[in-house]
Image: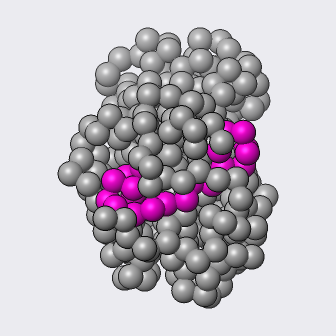
Amino acid sequence: MTSSLGIAVIGGGSFGTVVANIIAENGYEVSLWLRSEAQAQDILSTRINHRYMPDYPLLPEVMPTNDLEKAVSGAKVIIMAVPSKAFRQVLKQVKAYLADDAMVVSTTKGIEATSNSLMSQVMRQELPTQAIGVLSGPNLAKEIAKRQLAATVIASDDAEVRSIIQAILRRSYFRVYANNDMYGVELGGALKNIYAIATGMAAALGMGENTKSMLVTRSLAEMSRFAVRLGANPLTFIGLAGVGDLMVTCMSPLSRNYRVGFALGQGGSLEKIVEELGEVAEGVGTLECLHHWSKELDVYMPLVDGLYAVVFDGRSVEEVIKALMGGEQSSDVEFVLPRGA
């Protein structure tokens, strides 16, 4: 039986497509908005998103459309699944059709480069009266599409947002945990993309398991250090949205950011790599943003600085690694032993 609860997923990429189909599996009719009319019509006629999920049939309850007003009007739940660089622009368009009681949830793992804003901050700026939330976790869309066991985190200050998102997304193969630390959850999702580039480079260079382990754990230290500076809870980073998402993104060839790093490690140019990838790798933009932002906030982030030097300044990987290994020796976990103590 189809539920009458109005739901719209804004963005027809890999994750948006999977989220829409999960919602449909739970008996809800869901609009899936795509910018391209041709892509929307193709999905409507074939029930397949050939561009992003070619082996993943969509249920009849998923209604593709490129008519934003039709998708959003009357919907109680709006799930934003668009890249960070387009997030504010699309949200402004969504705003025109929002019901007063609609809740808006972001699945975007990135930072707005022009303002250093997290997606929750963009939503609060553009939609000051709406209930909002963020969804993030170790969620490779292609694995979820195969119904391999996975979990995610819904973070919101609003209990109703947490409850409704858990209800519409929970499946036997997909579990949804709750948190109220929106900054921590979305920073985990955004920042881990940077470090996935680093581990991809390490893999391409044939570095060992000890090296990969060091990279992942020092990455977690940097992520949590920066997030706490912005007011996040460091405990969020021992959960799915922190170490969980970091691990899957840094270890899986399915991760777009890992693939960017691997190609860089093989000597490829960034422009060609991004062009060949065919999908947005959020880590590239986040790296550029975070490098400058961390300087403004005076947050110690040597891995970010080193990776920036490789990706944007043309420094050799070997030179940067030597500098990192010869740099400051500090405490392992700052929340146990403060840096410099």
Does residue 198 show up magenta in the picture?
Answer: no
Query: Which quadrant of the view contains residue 338?
Result: bottom left
Q: Is residue 63 left or right of residue 211?
A: right
Residue 310 rendering spot, x and y as whole percentages: 67, 27
Residue at position x 79%, y 58% in the image: 114
Does residue 35 show up magenta in the picture?
Answer: yes
Residue at position x 37%, y 74% in the image: 164
Q: Nearer the viewer, residue 199 or 62?
A: 62
Query: Which quadrant of the view contains residue 264?
Result: top right
Residue at position x 35%, y 41% in the image: 144
Range of residues picked out in magenta: 19-40
Quarter holding the N terminus?
A: bottom left
The relative height of residue 202 versus residue 71 in the rendered view (above or below) is above
The relative height of residue 284 versus residue 190 in the rendered view (above or below) is above
The type of colouring in the image is: one colour
Q: Is residue 53 left or right of residue 139?
A: right
The answer to whether residue 152 is visible is no
Residue at the outermost left position: 172
Residue 280 rendering spot, x and y as whole percentages: 64, 38
The relative height of residue 336 versus residue 5 in the rendered view (above or below) is above
Residue 203 rendering spot, x and y as whole percentages: 45, 18
Tell me how many marks there are: 0
The relative height of residue 100 versus residue 204 in the rendered view (above or below) is below
Residue at position x 72%, y 49% in the image: 35
Q: Nearer the viewer, residue 339 or 131?
A: 131
Q: Nearer the viewer, residue 250 or 176?
A: 176
Quarter holding the C terminus?
A: bottom left
Query: Which quadrant of the view contains residue 296?
Result: bottom right
Q: Is residue 239 left or right of residue 327?
A: left
The answer to whether residue 267 is visible is yes
Residue 72 rendering spot, x and y as whole percentages: 63, 69
